[in-house]
Image (tube, rainbow, N blue to C red):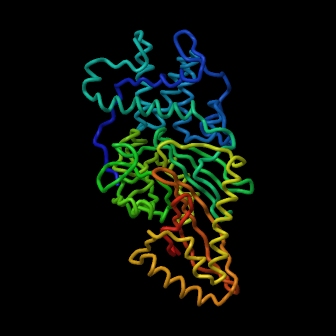
């Protein structure tokens, strides 16, 4: 878990918060130019629409961030007086939003003297907390990057191969962008409904061992919901623990625990991009929207160094192929042909204290108890992961004919000699 930062509110420092606007936008003399489109009011709710324009982002972003981005847009279009007024209102409404305080200070300074550059801090102020100033610059750039680099329309992270209708939401985190994306699963499949600025580990991503101050990379599930009343103020309005280390992490020898999605203390609005001990941390208002929606146990959370986006149409052949792979396992399991069933398992299979030979005895007992009854897999979820090797995380309910419910199982598959093999299988509910 992350430790509380001990940096004070630094109202007087200035931050280079316009630099990211120039990427992908045509530059005008003295400032960046953006499309002048009327933005919705901060409190207005509107359906999320994926777009490279600011209003679409404002419609679903947390109100404070949306208002900050509107200030950026006004400065970029030369409307500095209006930007100053909105900045003043923002810091009055959200006084613990440090980045907004710095932007306001920048605009105030610009009223009295020319600034050599946006975010130019007097040397005596900058010298007092240079590291914090750098962190705020990075925060500004990451927030603006979310405006500049929108996910392609209708695209999803490659890890989301198949999710059943019973999985109502999914989450993906892009560590390189300090961004969390929330998806809703409806009649038309997964749809991106919100995205939020998020903080990760002090030393970045790819956690390997306890105390390395890194955020893990991989496919995880929310295991529970922790109420703020049972936590200290440090964790904000609540927390969502993840199942790190997962079985693939354990296979790689990774250690550590206590990786959560959680909020910030009541006297803070947000943390700098790299400032936790490994957790993913969001502003409390943004976390609240997630706490109200997602369900523990069934909500997957993908954390990637950099998300790759692809349209479902392009991944349909892969989805069908992997669905057929899982169906082949089901048929072998239901048929009672133990040798055929064992061909799906890796020689390196391990389930707690059981190796492959011990697991064969377990399967033999289960097949005998099945007695030829039909076996169905309900609510199949297939998630993919690729780093040192190709991995599948498959979750399903196993229901025998004549039964209404059954065990919820999770399998981890890996590529061995070009073939998919199960290296872990266990009951999770």
Q: Residue furthest right?
A: 187
Tell me the residue at 47%/48% (across/down): 284
Q: Describe residue 316's horizontal placement relative to residue 141 as left or right.
A: right
Going 27% across and 29% down the picture, which residue do you hit?
A: 129
Relative to 239, does residue 156 appear above or below in the rendering?
above
Q: Toward the viewer: 289 or 410?
A: 410
Residue 221 % position (x, y): 51, 61
Picture quadrant of residue 50: top right
Residue 6 image point, x, y percent: 28, 42
- Is residue 122 placed above or below 357 in the rendered structure? above
Residue 12 vs 378, above or below: the answer is above
In the rendered view, tell whether residue 140 sits above or below residue 273.
above
Which residue is most to the front?
Answer: 417
Find residue 233 and report its image quarter: bottom left
Locate residue 44, reporting x and y percent. Answer: 65, 40
Residue nearer the viewer, 19 or 427: 427
User: Which residue is depicted at the point 43% across and 49% down?
Assistant: 280
Write the residue at 70% across / 46% down.
314
Q: Position of residue 196 (x, y in %)?
A: 53, 43
Q: Is residue 227 visible?
A: no
């Amino acid at each position: 878990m992350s430790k509380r930062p001990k940096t004070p509110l630094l109202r007087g420092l200035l931050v280079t918060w316009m630099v990211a606007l120039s990427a992908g936008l045509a530059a005008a003399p003295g400032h960046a130019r953006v499309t002048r489109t009327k933005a919705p009011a901060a409190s207005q709710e509107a359906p999320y629409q994926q777009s490279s324009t600011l209003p679409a982002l404002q419609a679903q972003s947390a109100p404070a961030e949306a208002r900050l981005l509107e200030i950026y847009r006004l400065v970029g279009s030369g409307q500095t007086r209006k930007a100053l007024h909105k900045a003043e209102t923002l810091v009055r409404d959200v006084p613990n939003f440090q980045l907004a305080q710095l932007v306001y200070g920048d605009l105030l300074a610009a009223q009295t003297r020319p600034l050599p550059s946006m975010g130019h801090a007097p040397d005596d102020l900058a010298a007092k907390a240079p590291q914090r100033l750098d962190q705020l610059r990075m925060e500004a750039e990451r927030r603006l990057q979310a405006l500049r680099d929108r996910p392609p329309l209708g695209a999803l992270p490659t890890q989301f191969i198949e999710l059943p209708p019973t999985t109502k939401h999914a989450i993906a985190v892009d560590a390189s962008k300090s961004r969390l994306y929330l998806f809703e699963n409806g009649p038309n499949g997964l749809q991106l409904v919100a995205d939020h600025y998020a903080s990760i580990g002090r030393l970045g991503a790819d956690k390997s061992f306890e105390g390395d101050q890194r955020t893990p990379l991989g496919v995880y599930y929310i295991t529970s919901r922790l109420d703020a009343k049972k936590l200290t103020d440090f964790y904000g309005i609540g927390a969502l623990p993840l199942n790190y280390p997962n079985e693939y992490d354990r296979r790689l020898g990774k250690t550590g625990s206590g990786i959560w999605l959680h909020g910030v203390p009541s006297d803070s609005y947000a943390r700098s991009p790299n400032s936790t001990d490994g957790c993913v941390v969001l502003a409390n208002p943004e976390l609240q929207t997630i706490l109200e929606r997602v369900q523990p146990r069934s909500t997957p959370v993908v954390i990637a160094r950099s998300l790759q986006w692809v349209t479902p149409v392009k991944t349909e052949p892969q989805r069908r192929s992997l669905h057929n792979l899982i169906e082949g396992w089901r048929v072998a399991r239901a048929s009672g042909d133990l040798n055929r069933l064992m061909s799906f398992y890796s020689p390196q299979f391990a389930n707690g204290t059981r190796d492959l030979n011990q697991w064969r005895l377990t399967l033999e007992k289960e097949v005998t108890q099945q007695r030829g009854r039909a076996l169905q897999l309900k609510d199949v979820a297939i998630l993919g992961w690729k780093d040192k090797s190709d991995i599948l995380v498959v979750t399903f309910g196993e229901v025998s004919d004549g039964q209404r419910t059954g065990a919820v199982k999770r399998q981890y598959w890996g590529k061995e000699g070009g073939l998919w093999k199960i290296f872990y299988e266990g009951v999770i509910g």
